[in-house]
Image (cartoon, grey):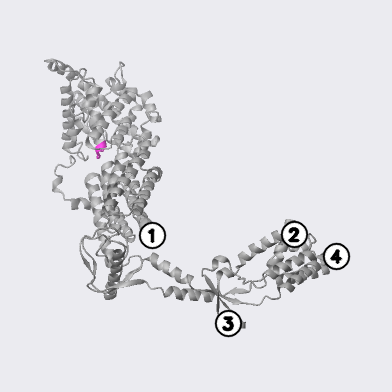
Amino acid sequence: MVKNRNAGNYSLISGLKSIPNKIFLLYFILTFVITLFFPKNNYSEYNYQPNDITREKIIAPFDFPILKTEEEVASERQAAIEKVPALFKEVDVSRQRSDIKSLVGELQSFSQQYQNLQDNKNSAGYSQDSSKFYSSLDNLKSRYGIQNEERPIFQIIYGQNNIQSSDLSTLYQILDEYRNAKITNCMSDSIISKQIAVTSPSRDNREVHIDTGNILCIDSLRIELDSQIDNRFPEAEQQKQDILKDILTIVIKPNLIWQSEITKERQDRARSRVPLSKGIVLENEKIVDANTKVNKDIYAKLQSLNKARAQKIQSENPLRRPLPLLGDPFIFMGQWLVVIIIFLLLLSFFYIHDRNILDDFKFSLLIALIFLIEVIVTNVFVFNFNMSEFSIPVTIAALTFTIIFNSVTAFVGLSILCILLGFQLGGNIYFIISSMLVSALAIFSVRSLRRRIQVMKSVIFIVFGYLFTISLTEIMQFASLEEITQHFIAGSINGIFSPFLTYGLIVSVETSLDITTDLGLLEMADFNHPLLKKLSKESSGTFSHSITVGNLAEAAADAVGANALLTRIGAYYHDIGKIAKPEYFIENQAYDENKHDKLKPNLSALVIINHVEEGIKLAEQYNLPEVITKFIRTHHGTTVIEYFYNKALEQAEDPEDVNKDDYRYPGPKPDTKETAILMICESIEAATRSLSKPSLRQLERLVDKIIKKKLDEGQLDESPLTFADLKNIKGSIEDNTGIMPTLKSEYHVRVEYPDQEDIEEAENEKGKSESSESS
């Protein structure tokens, strides 16, 4: 790394010690919480799944029962419950015919009383008669179990309708049809058995079994009664039919009363008698040979062995008894240590490749949240809902990491995430390989994000990746067509919805954590942005300079794997501070008088240096993100404005009176690849403007000279650029890499002829210093 040429003297361990404590605390807590969502009490020595091929012969180490699956136990328990007859007690309801006659008579009597009450409304005894009437009416409702006065039979009382003798005769006929019916007081769905048991005092409470097809539940009875009234009184008004139905509903009472508590006790006993095992494996009995496909029976034996081993270990060692949330403390600690090791790999990568992630707490928090959410989703989808592991949306993490960070960070981060999830799934190597491949395709689809539509195009890449990897891995495991189809559906749904969910997640991240993503940078690339429009109008030369620097910087960033989009946008805004006094910068002076001719060197330097501070103020005013403001702060580092410094030395009577720091930019130095690239490209662009007739060889020498100067001055000491990166930044015309092809096209370099270079070199040297004022 350029920032430390003796980096080999420092170990990775000492580097990790320099990571902020709050970052370590965050990831320490994260590893603990993540481990809570891992399977508990997993004592399995053989992590085989159905359709896997065994790698060794497995012999039973001790006797153990073959446990039924949860589905088998639930099914057998339900069957046992259904065999228990629901218990009912028979009661006498033989007075129903007299009850109907009595009810209709009382209703008609109340109707006459109500009419008399209305006729004597103004009499002195009205209040007393009214109280007596409603008291008697309450008594009627209590005796017949009538809850409210909105029922149709009250239309008889209030004179809105009446019952004829012929109507009463028809009701008797219907009643006689149900004289011997077995009517229960419960709903049809309450009885799950094929028979019911009936006890009666007349039979000394001896139980008699009756098929459910020979009984009527209360809901079925009401449906039949409604049908009877509709058929026997087709010409009657609906109001009249409702009254007749209501009378029958009140009078016909159930003669079988459900004994629910006793029934439930019998069902519970039947459920408890269902055995949890379906056989036994004896000690030293062969469970499965090597190189054998794991079928359902073998899988059941292996799962039973795991549970038996757990019980055996916990009974022999009290310290391994399960704790709330943790399960077996020994297994939990082992899982936690593995998770810590996995995250140490992640932290090591960040320290080596992108230290900014560790220095910025919000980036670390975002990564921690994504890892935690993925682990929780895995726990819920796979372990709680028994869904396909391909429904786990790892591609959301892949797309998010790529858009927010870069493709390298995304690939390494997702590889570690897939290993973590694979460990959570019991070492599922097929899931790890499949998820890494699909994540790589997702990263590839948005690696150079230039349009928002690319996020949607990633659907094709992800769905194709899932279909390919699922086909390959499942065929290798001899999976059934049903299992392959289930995985296909899960992967396809995952691939279709993940990009859209990612888009919403990115918007939320940008807003809540104030993180600038490539999607946000794309909006800043629009030349209609208010600040860029202001720059183009008030400082057109600087605007043109910024665009050219942007083209160079983007090519350089592509050459070294940096964020090309961020580098280009940073170049667009790096000189916005020149808007304050554009006439003091040579690219905006045209043929006017040079303003610096009338200023002392220290004042000229002050004006030039101040454009950095003015740029920071404009960035705050226009709410530019910090990641862009950083380019403004660092694009000159701590370099000295040599033109004015040398001029001051020439004019000073005593050179020691000239303070070099008065001519030095305040810094800081660039500390990322992107900001360091901008510093280099900005200096190269300024210098090449002084070349009137540049040749290719002159441009190459100029690039080498500027890069060497930045190195010698220590301006790149804080950046992660390597010497190989600096070589790649320059690039070559032949390979069409780096900034050389861009310089050639920008400045229309001509083919060199003999002696031409020597003639022009002297002319070009003359103008180099004239552009230094604009740096």
| Distance CA(mark 1)–CA(mark 2) | 56 Å
Q: Nearer the viewer, mark 1 or mark 2?
A: 2
Decide if residue 617 is in sight here: no
Which three-letter amino acid code belongs to the residue tagged 4?
A: Asn
Q: Are marks 4 and 2 in contact (CB under 8 Å)?
A: no
Q: Is residue 287 magenta?
A: no
Residue range of the region highlighted in magenta in the rendering = 667-674
- Within 10 Å of disc 4 (Cα), the crowding (few <14, some 14-19, many 20+) is few
| Distance CA(mark 1)–CA(mark 4) | 70 Å
Judging from the image, what secondary structure is the residue with disc 4 in? Answer: helix
Between residues 168 and 615, which one lies in front from this camera angle? 168
As drawn, 455 above or below 340: above
Between residues 653 and 562, which one lies in front from this camera angle? 562
On the image, the x and y values in percent for residue 630 come to 30, 37
Q: Is residue 668 magenta?
A: yes
Report the disc number at residue 116. 4
Which three-letter amino acid code belongs to the residue tagged 3?
A: Asn
| Distance CA(mark 3)–CA(mark 2) | 42 Å
Residue 116 is left or right of residue 765, and the answer is right
Which residue carries the number 1 mark?
384
- Which residue appears at 42% of the width and 66% of the height? 75
Disc count in the image?
4
Query: Could you tell which of marks 3 and 4 lies nearer the N-terminus?
Result: 4
On the image, the x and y values in percent for residue 165 come to 80, 66
Which residue carries the number 2 mark?
240
